[in-house]
Every structure is written in structure tokens, then in C-alpha cells.
Amino acid sequence: MSEFLSSPFLYVGVGSLAFFVATVFVAMSFRRVVSTNEVHIVQSSKATVSYGKDTGKGNTYYEWPSWIPVLGINKVVLPVSVFDLDLVSYEAYDKGRLPFVVDVKAFFRIVDSNVAAQRVASFEELHNQLKAIVQGAVRTILASNEIEEIMQGRSTFGEQFTKEVDAQLSNWGVATVKNIELMDIRDHKESSVIKNIMEKKKSFIEMESRQEV
């Protein structure tokens, strides 16, 4: 019995088993399961593959560190659900360079995760890029109109914002879900233009009412 326990073959077998168990443990530590509200775009030296619900590639993969030759990967995590973007108190100007601030709300969804992953390294970066696109569209369109027109046609300007943004979104693998909304327009902190316009309208309505009476 003692001869068997001291056999080199036994130690080789135990060592091999320990190595196998350690290898499996390490491999499992790199295994990733994609949640239902995300898609993980995995970029290796050979290909770019999206993992997640309805991707056709399943929802599990191994996140080998990028420094490992051949096997190493980089990943980008993006949402599959609709996400929103807000411009709050965004400073703008009308055609006559009158200052005011607006609140704008937009809703987006990712339609091509591979394209999006090629353009950005994270969802935060994508969000920032989309914000810059929306800001540019809002600034350009509002600067081409008088402030009275902007105040009276919020829904119309929302449609214009959307058309302007849609022209750029295909390059980012993103699409608008519905028209961008111009939620509010109000005076800049150093201006009273909108207040004066509202007071003028109020006075005009009161004058008409007195005339009718």
C-alpha cells in the first residue's frame, strides 16, 4: 500500500487533476452571461460579434483579457431598450440673437450594435456624442427663426429637430423612437424677452376683452 501511495504515477495523476480543476475554475471566472436588456459587442483579432437576446449568437461568451495573444478581446456594452436624452436649460439664440433657454427631450434606440461599437468605446461616450448632435440641431434650427415663432410652434420645431438629427444617426447605428420634444422655452437669466412678449400678449387679450364688453 505504501509503495502505491509513493508511486510517481499517483503524483502525476493528482497533479494533472489539480491543473485541470484550476484551468476550469479560471475559465469559468471569465465566463460572461449577458442580461436581457443589454448587448455585448465583443471585438477580437478576427471578428466583431454581438452577444445577447435576439442576436443569434447566444448570450454567453468568455471575456479573455485583451493582453492574451489570439484569445484576448475588447467589449462594448450597449442597451437594447429605449433610452432618453435631456437638454436642460440649454442656452440658445433666435434669428435676431435674442438669448433664451430651452428644455429638450429625445428618445433613442440602438438599431445596429456593431456599427455603434465601431464608433464608440462605451455607452457613456455614445450618449455624449448623441447629446452633441441634438445640441447642434437645436442650435441651428432655433437660430433660423424668430422667438415668437418658436414660442408658438413647439411641435413643429420638434419635428424639425428630429429630421435634422436623423440625417446623422445612421452613422452611429442609432435611430430616434419618436419626435424630439421641445418641452419648455423661457428667458435667459440675463434677459426678459419672453416675459415681455407674454406681458404684451396678456395686455392685448385684456384690451380685446374690454372692447367686446
Image: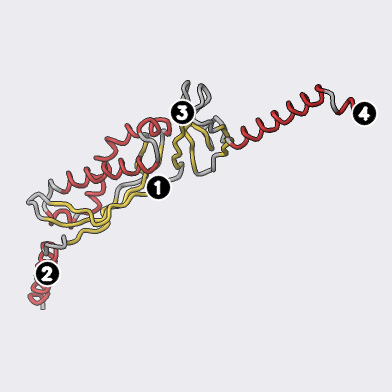
Determine which residue is flagged by label 1: 83
Q: Kindly indicate whether the residue at mark 1 contacts the one at mark 4 (C-beta within 8 angstroms).
A: no
Q: Position of residue 122 (x, y in %)?
A: 40, 39
| Identity, as a three-letter code, of the amino acid under mark 4 | Met
Determine which residue is flagged by label 2: 199
Mark closest to the chain's N terminus, 2 or 4:
4
Determine which residue is flagged by label 4: 1
Which element carries disc 3, helix, strand or loop?
strand
Q: CA distance from mark 3 to mark 1?
A: 24 Å
Which element carries disc 1, helix, strand or loop?
strand
Mark closest to the chain's N terminus, 3 or 4:
4
Query: Residue at horizontal 88%, vertical 26%?
Result: 4
Residue 154's tag is: none
Mark closest to the chain's N terminus, 4 or 1:
4
Mark closest to the chain's N terminus, 3 or 1:
3
Determine which residue is flagged by label 3: 43
Nearer to the camera, 210 or 168: 168
Which element carries disc 2, helix, strand or loop?
helix
